[in-house]
Amino acid sequence: MKSTLSIMEIYFTGVIIAISTFLIIGLFHPLVIKAEYYLGTRCWWAFLIAGLVSIGCAFFVADVFWSAIIGVVGASLLWSIGELFHQKKRVEKGWFPMNPKRRHEYNIKNEEKDENKLDSGRKNNE
């Protein structure tokens, strides 16, 4: 006799893709910070090429899980281009450390203000 109650099947693919997406985005955050610190914004084209190649490869992968993961990596690489330039602005604001070897690449306005404050303080003391 066949039971009318069927065992519910649970599919984890969506949840695993969501967790993987979260981890991939989390990995790209420090990658962008390190890339800007050591290479500056001149490496944006590497993110572009890698992102386009990844997205292109995702079209040819039959397995939904791996296609989605490769697509998320590609999209994260492309998103990182904008974040790379935003990271430079965050460094200029003093929110992140600046690479002293590339100091000439930044537009720093705080140093000029600090120098003016020091000069006006010296004039008041005289």
Image: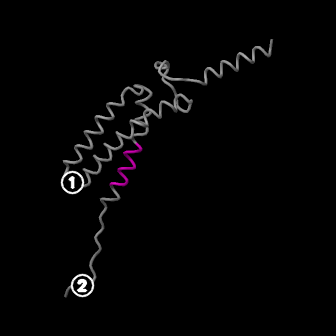
122 with respect to 66 (left or right): right
Please give the name of the residue rendered at 29% of the width and 73% of the height, measured from the top-left corner.
Answer: 8
Dominant secondary-structure state across the stretch colored magenta: helix
**In the figure, residue 65 lies in which quadrant?**
bottom left
Q: Tell me the quarter of the image containing the C terminus.
A: top right
Q: Measure how far apart labels 1 and 2 are at the Cα level.
A: 34 Å
SS type, badge 2: loop
List x then y, in percent, for residue 77: 34, 39
Please give the name of the residue rendered at 35% of the width and 50% of the height, measured from the top-left corner.
Answer: 20
* Callout 1 amino acid: Asp
SS type, badge 1: loop
Q: Which residues are magenta?
A: 17-26
**Category of crowding for the residue at label 2, using alpha-carbon neighbours closer than 10 angstroms: few (below 14), some (14–19), many (at least 20):** few
* Callout 2 amino acid: Ser
Q: Is residue 30 above or below residue 22?
A: above
**Category of crowding for the residue at label 1, using alpha-carbon neighbours closer than 10 angstroms: few (below 14), some (14–19), many (at least 20):** few
List x then y, in percent, for residue 73: 32, 44
Q: Earlier in the sequence, mark 1 or mark 2?
A: 2
| Tag 2 residue | 3
Q: Tell me the quarter of the image containing the N terminus.
A: bottom left
* Nearer the camera: disc 1 or disc 2: 1
In the foreground, 82 or 34: 82
